[in-house]
Amino acid sequence: MNLQGDFEGLTLASILQLLCNDQKTGVLTVTCDDEESRVFFEQGAIVYASASLKEARLGFLMRADGIISAQQLQKCLAFAKEEKMHLGKIMVEKGYISLDTLKKYNTKQVEAILYNLLFWKKGRFEYKDAKLNLKGMIITQLNPMKLILEASRRIDELSVLKKFIPSDKLVFKMSGKVQSKEEIKLNANEWRILSLIDGTRTVRQIINESGYDEFAVYKIFFSVISSGLIEQKEEVLLDDQGGNNDCSAILTVFNDILQAVRKNIVDELGDRSYSLFEEIKADVSIEFKEVLKDYHPDNHRNSNLQAITGAMDKIDIIEDPNEFLITGFAEYTTHVLLKVGEILGSHPLIKILDDIEKVLEYVKKYQAGSKEKSKIVNDMKNVIMKIYSDFKIDKKGSSKGGIFSLFSR
């Protein structure tokens, strides 16, 4: 039997169920971008699995749990490569672990790989019948159906957790509310994650460095956030390390810009100041309307981030997501400022533009250099020039230094 194709969502779970029900013996290869995993079936049971991700490797799991030291692992890895032997067998022979421990962690490794697979939203699979050579391997006997049910439960729970932590690019820091370690009651896994939270690592970096799976880390994050031990770091850096899907920093800057507008019009417009931001959505380009659907500058930053990233994920083709987002928010800000000027006249715009300058001054002074930073500053420069031109505002009427002092340095 040869089965291959693309999958999305729960299709992969259906494939595992099919191979289980048909009592297949062979190898299922699953790929997604640069990641590849292989699942070995023996008469419908999963007996082994391998993955390209280091998080799923046997030695990495043991080191993360403190079963072996980093030095012992490196020594065993070097020996395994030189002698072309199985890592687990070497660790047992050297007396670092027992055979029972090896079996236990071999099962954990297979489970980690499979749970990771079932979290993939799309990819490509290929199954081939094959006679397996399991001689010398530590095999397991896992029922795919039990794994699928547990994975489904985790997926549902993770979707709830991600409402509180909507992006793995967020950075957390210790809150300082707890005076001493004696006041904190955490298990070993929670201490491990807490030790990595330093105000510089992103959630994704902590997942990678901890050796724990994504679900486990998100649960621990939720636990320590709820207990008040950690809090989200306010500053989000604009740099070139975040990846194309990291919109948290861009959203933070534009939310500050739009809040500068909101605080200057709330006394004059009252409740209308809130609805104005909703009304303006009708004026933006069609492709950006859906992105702004559930966004409002008064919403909590995590709610906005989840709304924006969720909407972006539904758009089939975006060549450069960050550029698309900056262009869209600059357009939205332009329409907001035009409407404010239309309602209140040009005088309030002077204070608003000065406050926007302060936001951009912070971005220019403290944010790392990147194409995102340059585009935000340049696009907002054009927005400000348009507002000055459309309302015939004299630059000298702005605060000391003038609105264009930011761009002339």
Image (tube, helix red, strand yellow):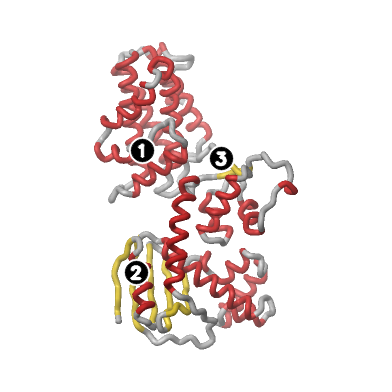
Tell me the element at label 2.
helix
Locate residue 328: give its quadrant: top left
Task: Count residues near mark 2 (Cα–Cα under 10 Å), then give few for <14, some for 14-19, many for 20+.
Answer: some
Q: Earlier in the sequence, mark 3 or mark 1?
A: 3
Task: Check the image and report above or below for 338 versus 205.
Answer: above
Q: CA distance from mark 1 to mark 2?
A: 33 Å
Q: Position of residue 305 (x, y in %)?
A: 43, 41
Q: Tags 3 and 1 in contact by the CB under 8 Å rule?
A: no
Q: Is residue 129 left or right of residue 238?
A: left
Q: Looking at numbered disc 3 in the image, what kind of residue is underneath it?
A: Lys
Would you name the residue on which mark 1 appears? 294
Q: Which mark is residue 145?
A: none
Circle number at residue 14: 2
Q: Is residue 317 above or below residue 397?
A: below
Is 360 or 8 nearer to us in this picture?
A: 8
Give above or below for 349 relative to 217. above
**Callout 3: helix, strand or loop?**
loop
Q: Is residue 87 left or right of 386 when viewed as pictured?
A: right
Q: Residue at x 43, y 30 (%)?
A: 298
The residue at the point 50 percent across, 58 percent down is: 214
Mark 3 or mark 2, which has the lower sequence index?
A: 2
Q: Quadrant of residue 292?
A: top left
Left or right of 304 on screen, residue 287: left
Task: Identify which residue, 103 or 73, lies in the foreground.
Answer: 103
Look at the numbered disc 1 and give the secondary structure of its residue: loop
x and y, in percent, of residue 389 in the image: 30, 18
Tell me the amino acid under the disc marked 1: Asp
Check the picture and name the quadrant holding the N terminus. Answer: bottom left
Disc 3 designates what residue?
233
Looking at the image, is 363 positioned above or below residue 347? below
Distance from label 3 to label 2 (Cα)?
Answer: 41 Å
Q: Residue furthest left?
A: 286
